[in-house]
Protein backbone atom coordinates (compact mmCIF):
# COMPACT_ATOMS: atom_id res chain seq x y z
CA UNK A 1 0.00 0.00 0.00
CA UNK A 2 1.87 3.05 -1.20
CA UNK A 3 1.63 6.35 0.60
CA UNK A 4 1.77 9.36 -1.71
CA UNK A 5 2.74 12.84 -0.55
CA UNK A 6 1.19 15.98 -2.02
CA UNK A 7 1.54 19.75 -1.63
CA UNK A 8 -1.35 22.18 -1.94
CA UNK A 9 -0.60 24.95 -4.44
CA UNK A 10 -2.94 27.36 -2.64
CA UNK A 11 -1.68 27.16 0.97
CA UNK A 12 1.59 25.17 0.56
CA UNK A 13 0.43 22.51 3.06
CA UNK A 14 1.94 19.01 2.60
CA UNK A 15 -0.23 15.95 3.22
CA UNK A 16 -0.24 12.21 2.55
CA UNK A 17 -2.74 9.89 0.88
CA UNK A 18 -2.76 6.11 1.33
CA UNK A 19 -3.65 4.11 -1.77
CA UNK A 20 -5.37 0.91 -0.63
CA UNK A 21 -6.30 -0.51 -4.05
CA UNK A 22 -5.25 0.32 -7.58
CA UNK A 23 -8.83 1.09 -8.64
CA UNK A 24 -9.54 3.12 -5.47
CA UNK A 25 -10.59 6.70 -6.24
CA UNK A 26 -9.93 9.44 -3.72
CA UNK A 27 -10.84 13.08 -3.74
CA UNK A 28 -7.67 15.10 -4.19
CA UNK A 29 -8.11 18.11 -1.96
CA UNK A 30 -6.08 19.78 0.75
CA UNK A 31 -7.19 18.90 4.29
CA UNK A 32 -6.30 22.44 5.46
CA UNK A 33 -7.91 24.79 2.91
CA UNK A 34 -9.81 22.21 0.79
CA UNK A 35 -8.05 23.49 -2.33
CA UNK A 36 -8.08 21.06 -5.24
CA UNK A 37 -4.90 22.17 -6.99
CA UNK A 38 -2.21 19.87 -5.60
CA UNK A 39 1.08 18.48 -6.86
CA UNK A 40 2.79 15.23 -5.97
CA UNK A 41 6.11 15.72 -4.19
CA UNK A 42 9.11 13.44 -3.84
CA UNK A 43 8.93 11.87 -0.40
CA UNK A 44 11.82 11.03 1.90
CA UNK A 45 12.68 7.36 2.08
CA UNK A 46 13.73 5.29 5.05
CA UNK A 47 15.28 1.88 4.57
CA UNK A 48 17.24 -0.77 6.45
CA UNK A 49 19.80 -2.92 4.75
CA UNK A 50 21.39 -6.01 6.17
CA UNK A 51 24.11 -8.42 5.32
CA UNK A 52 23.78 -12.07 6.23
CA UNK A 53 27.56 -12.43 6.55
CA UNK A 54 27.72 -9.70 9.21
CA UNK A 55 30.19 -7.49 7.31
CA UNK A 56 29.96 -3.79 6.56
CA UNK A 57 29.88 -4.29 2.78
CA UNK A 58 26.08 -3.88 2.59
CA UNK A 59 26.00 -0.51 4.35
CA UNK A 60 25.44 2.62 2.25
CA UNK A 61 28.32 5.08 1.97
CA UNK A 62 27.33 8.71 2.53
CA UNK A 63 29.57 11.46 1.20
CA UNK A 64 28.95 15.13 1.99
CA UNK A 65 30.73 18.28 0.87
CA UNK A 66 30.21 22.03 0.84
CA UNK A 67 28.48 23.50 -2.20
CA UNK A 68 27.51 27.02 -3.23
CA UNK A 69 23.94 26.39 -2.01
CA UNK A 70 24.94 24.89 1.35
CA UNK A 71 25.75 21.25 1.99
CA UNK A 72 25.50 18.68 -0.78
CA UNK A 73 25.62 14.95 -0.37
CA UNK A 74 25.46 11.68 -2.21
CA UNK A 75 24.54 8.18 -1.13
CA UNK A 76 26.18 5.13 -2.68
CA UNK A 77 23.72 2.30 -2.07
CA UNK A 78 25.21 -1.20 -2.44
CA UNK A 79 23.74 -3.54 -4.96
CA UNK A 80 24.45 -5.13 -8.30
CA UNK A 81 26.39 -2.96 -10.73
CA UNK A 82 25.37 -2.50 -14.35
Image: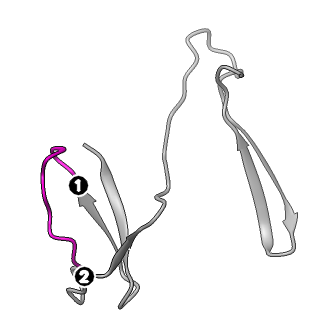
Check if mark 1's residue and mark 2's residue have beta carbons within 8 Å. no
Q: Residue at x 24, y 82 (%)?
A: 36
Quadrant where the N terminus lies?
Answer: top left
Place residue 58 in its image quadrant.
Answer: top right
Q: Does residue 28 appear left or right of residue 68 in this picture?
A: left
Q: Is residue 19 above or below residue 28?
A: above
| Image position, residue 22 (x, y; %) | 19, 44
In the rendered structure, find residue 18 and report the number of the disc placed on it: 1
**For the magenta stretch, what is the residue range?**
19-30
> SS for tag 2?
loop
Label 1 – label 2 distance at C-alpha: 17 Å
Q: Is residue 58 above or below residue 71?
A: above
Q: Nearer the viewer, residue 55 or 31?
A: 31
The main secondary structure of the magenta stretch is: loop
Quadrant where the C terminus lies?
Answer: top right
Which of disc 2 and disc 1 is earlier in sequence?
1
Q: Residue at x 21, y 71 (%)?
A: 28
Q: Does residue 32 appear left or right of residue 39 in this picture?
A: left
Q: Residues within 10 Å of mark 2 (few under 14, many from 20)?
A: some
Q: Does residue 46 appear left or right of residue 27 in this picture?
A: right
Residue 20 in magenta stretch: yes
Residue with the mark numbered 2: 36
Q: Residue at x 16, y 47 (%)?
A: 20
Q: Is residue 51 above or below residue 66?
A: above
Q: Nearer the viewer, mark 1 or mark 2?
A: 2
| Image position, residue 37 (x, y; %) | 31, 81
Place residue 32 in its image quadrant.
Answer: bottom left
Amino acid sequence: MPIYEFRCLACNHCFELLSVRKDDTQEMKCPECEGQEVERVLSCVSYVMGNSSGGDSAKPKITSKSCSGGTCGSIDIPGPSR
